[in-house]
Image (cartoon, helix red, strand yellow):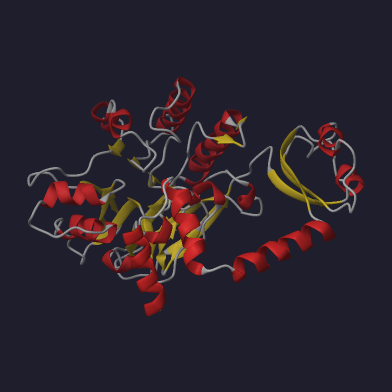
Amino acid sequence: MKIFHISDLHIGKQLHLYDISVVQKTILEQIVEKAKECRPDVIVIAGDIYDKSAPSGEAFHLFDGFLNALGDIKPMIPVLIIAGNHDNHLRLNYASSFLEKHHIYISAFLPKNEDEHLKKIVLKDDYGDVNFYLLPFTRIADGKNLFGCEKEIQTYDDAVSAMLEREDIDYTQRNVLVAHQFFVKGQNQPERRESELRYISVGGIDSVDIACVENFDYVALGHIHSSQSMGKPYIRYSGTPLKYSVSEASDMKSITVATLGEKGKEIELEFLPLEMKPDVRKIKGTLEEVIALAKEDNRNDFVSITLTNEKVPYKAKERLQEFYSNILEVSVENSQTEARLQQDMADKISEDPIALFADFYQEMNNTPMSEQEQQVLIDIVNKL
């Protein structure tokens, strides 16, 4: 069974305040064309369809056009969709019963009582059934609401593990999990990008260990924006289909194609490239060197520019805007900034750790630490 795995469309998202809806539309059109060419047996979208819980009308229209284009492919390819942490469950679930008649299956809600279970879609190939379990983004509160006093749910790991255990999955069959969580393997965490960092809790509080999903034959993940496996080749983040931050400039965006054979056979992975146009690029050099790199085919790219002039030219950004239409940021890197950075680092290293944490605490909570909290911190530092 050939699975197209994508996630984190973030329809409606801006790039440094630039409207990129046209770029998003182009990428979605590429996914449709790849589906026509490669004929997957199923398309999986692992959460964060929209960037905001209240998407704009344009965002709804864009996703509706994408689903319609996929629906026009004959014979029809089933599409499986789960809610991510950015998605509004009610809005994403709208018209889901109608869409199921057209083989588009949406799982926006988690089980809320004993009689409800995760949405399970069974598809068939030459080797028999493949069971797809759809797990929307799960929080600690979701586990507490479902299990009450029956289970102690204190972490995201507890909530997700309990949700899967109650499904009583037959692992002698072929099973695929579609999930949108921050999965880790012990102390090993996935590589992250700037565009997602503010949605991951400090200290990894929302992490879920892959131990609870290792028995699946494929785990199609969303939430992390760079394509990568997590601990096992078959536990995989597809990453975003386009670049949403400067930190992704060198990423190769793609569709993850996972092919399941018979039970027990190693999964086959392939990556179909997606071309973002205009692209996101980093450029570094003197003002003159950066200007010289501007060509007709790249001057509309979204660019992050680092100038290395020892003396910053007058109105540098204004001059650069004559050659580049979409400048994301302009920074300066020379001997003066390097010396200042090294001094700042030296100052920080020499500071008292308790004072540093107190500054961090106030910045995060907009209030200073209490005397009791300070004493707790002092005790921890002394113990360490």
Q: On the picture, is 29 further left or further right than 318? A: left
Q: On the picture, is 209 further left or further right than 250? A: left
The image shows residue 14, relative to residue 249, as above or below, that is above
**Is 384 or 256 nearer to us in this picture?**
384
| Quadrant in the rendering for residue 30 | top right
Q: On the picture, is 312 further left or further right than 72? A: right
**Is 332 or 381 nearer to us in this picture?**
381
| Quadrant in the rendering for residue 297 | top right
Report x, y in % for residue 180: 36, 50
**Is 210 or 39 nearer to us in this picture?**
210
Q: How many marks?
A: 0
Q: On the picture, is 260 further left or further right than 299? A: left
**Residue name at image x 54 percent, y 55 percent:** 271
Report x, y in % for residue 58: 49, 22
- Quadrant including the N terminus: bottom left
Can residue 218 be spotted in the picture?
no
Report x, y in % for residue 175: 27, 59
Report x, y in % for residue 75: 38, 36
The image shows residue 274, relative to residue 70, as above or below, that is below
**Residue name at image x 59 percent, y 33 percent:** 26
Q: Residue furthest top?
A: 57
| Quadrant in the rendering for residue 189 | bottom left
Can residue 337 be spotted in the picture?
yes
**Is 382 or 282 nearer to us in this picture?**
382
**Residue name at image x 36 percent, y 63 percent:** 261
- Quadrant including the C terminus: bottom left
Q: Residue furthest front?
A: 371
**Residue name at image x 44 percent, y 70 percent:** 188
The image shows residue 381, relative to residue 52, as above or below, that is below
